[in-house]
Amino acid sequence: MDKKIKIKAKHVDFFYGKSQALKNINMDIFDCDVTAIIGPSGCGKSTFIRLLNRMHELVPHTNVTGEVLLDGQNIFCCSMDAVEVRKRVGMVFQKPNPFPKSIFDNISYGLKVNGIKDKYFIEEKVERSLRKAALWEEVKDRLYDSALRLSGGQQQRLCIARTLAVESETILFDEPCASLDPISTAKIEELILELKKDYTIVIVTHNMQQAARVSDYTAFFLMGELIEFGKTQEIFTAPKDSKTEAYITGRFG
Amino acid sequence: MHPRIKEKIYKWIFTVFAFSSLVFLLGIIIVLFKEGLPIFQKVSFSKFIFGKTWYPTYDPPEFGILPLILASVWVTVGAIFICVPLGVGSALYLHEIAGYKQRAILKPLIELLASIPSVVYGFFGMMILTPFLQNIFNLPTGLTALNASIILGIMATPTVCSLADDALNYVPKAFREASFAVGANRWQTLTKVVIPAAGSGISTAIILGMSRAIGETMTVLMVAGGASAIPKSFFQPVRPMTAAIAAEMGEAPMGGDHYHALFAIALVLFLITFVFNIIAEIISRRYRIKLGLSG
Ligand SMILES: Nc1ncnc2c1ncn2[C@@H]1O[C@H](COP(=O)(O)OP(=O)(O)O)[C@@H](O)[C@H]1O
Ligand SMILES: [Mg+2]
């Protein structure tokens, strides 16, 4: 059966100044699946997912060629607005980065900057996003406390809720558990599996077990190239490329 | 020598250096109190602070420093109206709009402004601003509170700009990224995330700028006009506290009442700047905690 392709990268090259960080990436990201991106440090994982919602534009002197199609539309095309792309493709970062504001304001921020003023709507949306991010029960009595007082794992779920509030259809996770303890990590993984019912998810991870646990598809990057892409099960049990095999069996990395 | 002993000696030397500034500070405070307090045997504290006339050389003399305090307040407030928009505005420009190359040129240039001796600013005020103000406002003299405010404002601008820029740079990049990632544009990110996060740092910058303006001496001596009447408009000559001390210290007989009164003014000035600096410190500490930086 044919799956719906949510994001399609076509011949993507990426440059920081003159140095090339990605070479001719072609990859499909399927709707309502979890796609994991693995590979050693510096191979271009973050660079790749950041360009999927045009976050690379915050870094000066970067250049990208090729196409990234979001629901068939090139996100770099002149008629697409970076703000619009980022609303549809949200991002959760490696280090939890809540604003130094209250829990409530952290979630409502994305709604407010997108022009929503209806207080009732915002309140409801905040609650729903926190529930979806499995954080509501823990914070419902202190919505107006500073978000910085939450634990690291709670902060990361808050950042996920913040993304859910703006109704992104796709969420990019850049090593979301890198700074978390095992219990918080387990909670985030559980949440990702829950979210994939409604969302397309891309997760960069250093942790091979994590990729195996949460993802349906896995892409292996090495030195700016996509070496292998396929069903997670196949990549982990029967990799086609010897470099992939070397990496997942821990021979380098 | 044994390395352990050497280490100990170094440690002592640096400790002495570090504490010597504390000793200087203490010394200054002691002198201010010792030379300033005797005036209060002649005039009550409240008459000194709230007295409306400063005639230190009359017979009998009058030691009311309210006109001097108000003059300082006026020129400082006036300076704020200049240095806050200029300083914060240029910090925002440096931070948001100027590219890497522009910034590399502009920032040192602005900091260079801070290192120009105050007598040069005063000279500029006397020779260029004074006739200019006199002409356009048709004043009997161009040496006025307004003139002093403008020059002090320009002088405090680099301080405010540099500190405000630091405050903006302290705002973690992650906040900006988070804001962009939920679809905010640059303006929204700046006004709703970056500036609030840097807000107390910017307030600190403004307070330290004020503290610089209120303590500045040479320029106000040169351009404020020197009249020790209670200021009623910015177009009048005024005599701020620093100017009074600098202008009169040479003439006041040592150990006399006038002499002690001038020290008492210095004491008041010291306390004001001290309070400013403490407030700035408290705000900046709260701010660093708020941003999750070290306390
Ligand atoms: N802002 C940047 N400027 C220049 N080079 C960068 C920048 N960010 C990353 N790179 C380079 O691009 C390559 C890929 O980096 P990155 O995408 O962060 O790798 P990963 O996330 O897989 O560890 C690395 O060689 C890195 O040094
Ligand atoms: Mg990375």
Image (cartoon, coloured by chain):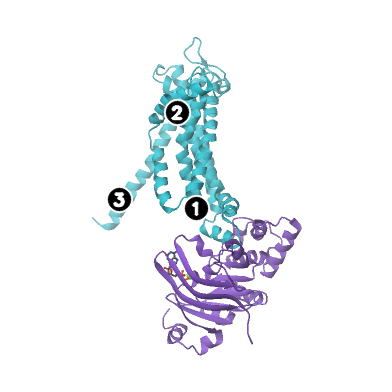
What is the quadrant of residue A20 in the picture? Answer: bottom left
Could you tell me how far apart the alpha carbons at marks 1 and 3 are, in whole angstroms?
A: 36 Å
Could you tell me how far apart the alpha carbons at marks 1 and 2 are, in whole angstroms?
A: 37 Å
| Residues flagged by tags 3 and 2 on a common chain | yes
Residue B7 circle label: none
The residue that appears at 64% across and 68% down in the rendered structure is: A168
What is the quadrant of residue A155 in the picture? Answer: bottom right
Q: Secondary structure at mark 2?
A: helix
Q: Which tag, 1 or 2, sits closer to the chain's start? A: 2
The residue marked by circle 2 belongs to what chain? B
Residue B32 circle label: 2
Q: Which residue is tagged 3?
A: B9
Residue B170 circle label: 1
Q: Amino acid at mark 3?
A: Ile
Nearer to us of marks 3 and 2 is: 2
Q: Is residue A134 left or right of residue B220?
A: right
CB atoms of marks 1 and 2 within 8 Å: no
Q: Which chain comes out cyan in the rendered image?
A: B
**Of all residues shown, which one is farthest toward the right?**
A120
